[in-house]
């Protein structure tokens, strides 16, 4: 009798355990494949790429939202890249000028992103209508090579308090130009 009660309890606990172990993917809902996903929409050594999504009852507003989303992502990628470059230079050179170099890169990044670059290119766009709302997906890219050339040109026109910082900024940009040409 004791043995059958133990077996029943063990069986009951097992059923509860396996019923509670529902597939984790189903706990979040069905997986949705967004348009513009895959390697041709991701940044690589030659391009910064970003995909934006906008939704509105008006198609032109949905498109503008998607544009702002994608361009914001691009600006973030450029900003993170510049931060990484200045951090790497600062750790390599041990000069203690890392913050000053980063601030110069911040200024250059702002200039690059606020200037309408000729090489910013929308390479894909899709619009959906569900009967009520328009959903627009856009994909933009910037050639890293062109962007770094533009930054190099801008860096030469900047006023620097310290020639060492100017040289460091120009060296970093030159190094990135070489990487993007490979």
Image: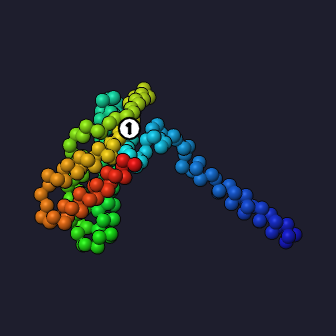
Residue 4 shows up from this direction: yes
Residue 115 locus on image (x, y percent) = 20, 43
Residue 165 locus on image (x, y percent) = 20, 64
Q: Residue at x 41, y 31 (%)?
A: 126
Residue 97: image quadrant is bottom left
Horizontal placement of 100 versus 130: left or right? left
Residue 96: image quadrant is bottom left
Q: Residue at x 29, y 39 (%)?
A: 120
Residue 179 locus on image (x, y percent) = 37, 52
Looking at the image, residue 18 lies above or below residue 36:
below
Q: Residue at x 29, y 73 (%)?
A: 94
Q: Quadrant of the N terminus?
A: bottom right
Horizontal placement of 124 versus 169: left or right? right
Q: Which residue lies most toward the right here?
A: 1
Looking at the rendered structure, the number of numbered marks drawn on it comes to 1
Residue 49: image quadrant is top left
Residue 117 locus on image (x, y percent) = 24, 40
Q: Which residue lies most toward the top here?
A: 131
Looking at the image, residue 19 lies above or below residue 70:
below
Q: Nearer the viewer, residue 52 or 114?
A: 114
Q: Which residue is mark 1?
A: 139
Secondary structure type for disc 1: strand
Residue 72 shows up from this direction: no
């Amino acid at each position: 009798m004791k043995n059958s009660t133990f077996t029943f309890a063990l069986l009951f606990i097992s059923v509860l355990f396996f019923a509670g172990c529902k597939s984790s993917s189903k706990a979040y809902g069905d997986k949705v494949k967004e348009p513009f996903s895959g390697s041709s929409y991701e940044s690589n050594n030659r391009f910064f790429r970003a995909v934006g999504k906008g939704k509105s009852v008006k198609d032109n507003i949905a498109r503008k939202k998607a544009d702002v989303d994608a361009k914001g992502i691009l600006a973030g990628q450029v900003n993170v890249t510049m931060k990484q470059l200045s951090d790497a230079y600062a750790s390599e050179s041990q000069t203690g000028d890392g913050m000053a170099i980063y601030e110069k890169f911040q200024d250059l990044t702002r200039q690059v992103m606020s200037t309408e670059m000729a090489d910013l290119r929308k390479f894909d766009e899709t619009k959906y209508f569900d009967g009520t709302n328009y959903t627009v997906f856009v994909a933009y890219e910037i050639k890293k090579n062109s962007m770094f050339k533009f930054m190099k040109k801008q860096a030469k026109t900047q006023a620097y308090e310290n020639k060492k910082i100017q040289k460091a900024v120009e060296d970093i940009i030159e190094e990135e130009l070489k990487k993007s040409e490979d």
